[in-house]
Amino acid sequence: MSQPPNKLSREDSIVLIVGPTGVGKSTFIEYATGQDGGTVGHGLESYTADIRTVRVKHPTHGHSVAFVDTPGFGDTYKSDTEILTTIAEWFIKSYKGHNNIAVIIYLHRISDNRVNGSVLKNLHILPSLLGSKAMPNVVIATTMWKKVTEEEGIAREKELKSKFWNEMLADGCRIERFTDTYDSAWEIIDGPAKTNGAQVLLPHEMVDIRLRLNETGAGVALNKELEKLIKDQKDAARRLRELVNSQDNELVVQELNERKTELDETIRRTAAQLHQMKIPLTRKVRLFLKGRS
């Protein structure tokens, strides 16, 4: 009897696809499932707002493989706290169901000439969410090689390995290149064989240790990212105020004020997310005393 599309079973070998919005997660799945990337959304908005599952038979041994497409932090519509909650709920269900997460593929655009804030946020939160024990089951797969020369791609890959991926690599994760083909996708999936599924930290923290989401490593990492974001946004708002005060042109002043209004709204939304991630003082005291006992 076939499984419902979004229902996982112990017979499934799960391939979890993660990374920021727009890196090609849905495209990777479409190539791996033989659809050649022809049906995904290519607009500026996020295509994957929620977690979805696509099940296929393995091309060699025919076993069931379930691709799980996840939203990235910095999504078009959902806040980062909503995304972390969605991902945490999925991991907990998978953990309790004893599902086999065979490989976790983190996608990164090699065509990006710099690492922007959204990518950095994902890179800071992901290791805290997965934990070092999961890294032997993690693959960093670079995408969009057709948009760069080979020399550019190799140089960026080298910089990323030394500056941004070094800790993940030290814990056992590997690097691959996705070249927009069916064979390339499966070479990434079927890399060095793993005897056991990924031992992901987040569900262990929440199910076994019984931490709240905001107390987990991923929750603490997101909290730090939000605090940094608010600081940066407030600095930008201060600079805009200074520019407004120094301008005589009414049109320029109007445009700057509009930008400041937008920034103030962003600060408000970010502050609301930060408030959601705060741990109540009484809970902090209990955790401290528990740690001392």
Image (tube, rainbow, N blue to C red):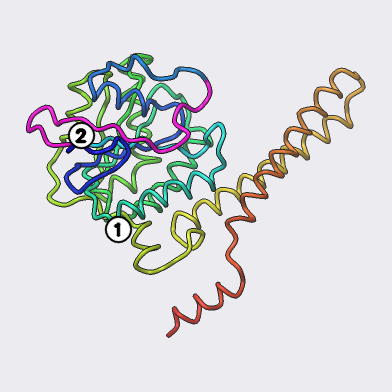
- The secondary element bearing badge 2 is classed as helix
> Most extreme residue toward the left, as rendered?
61
Is residue 147 placed above or below 25 in the rendered structure?
above
User: Where does label 1 land, which residue?
Assistant: 96
User: Where does label 2 land, which residue?
Assistant: 189
Q: What is the span of residues highlighted in magenta in the rendered image?
A: 44-64
Amino acid beneath label 1: Lys
Q: Residue 239: x and y, percent?
A: 77, 36
Q: Residue 4 carries which label?
A: none
Considering depth in this image, is 292 or 239 the residue closer to the camera? Answer: 292
Magenta stretch holds residue 49: yes
> Most extreme residue toward the bottom, as rendered?
293
Mark 2 and 1 residues: CB-CB less than 8 Å, in contact? no
- The secondary element bearing badge 1 is classed as helix
Residue 6 image-quadrant placement? top left
Image quarter where the C terminus lies is: bottom left
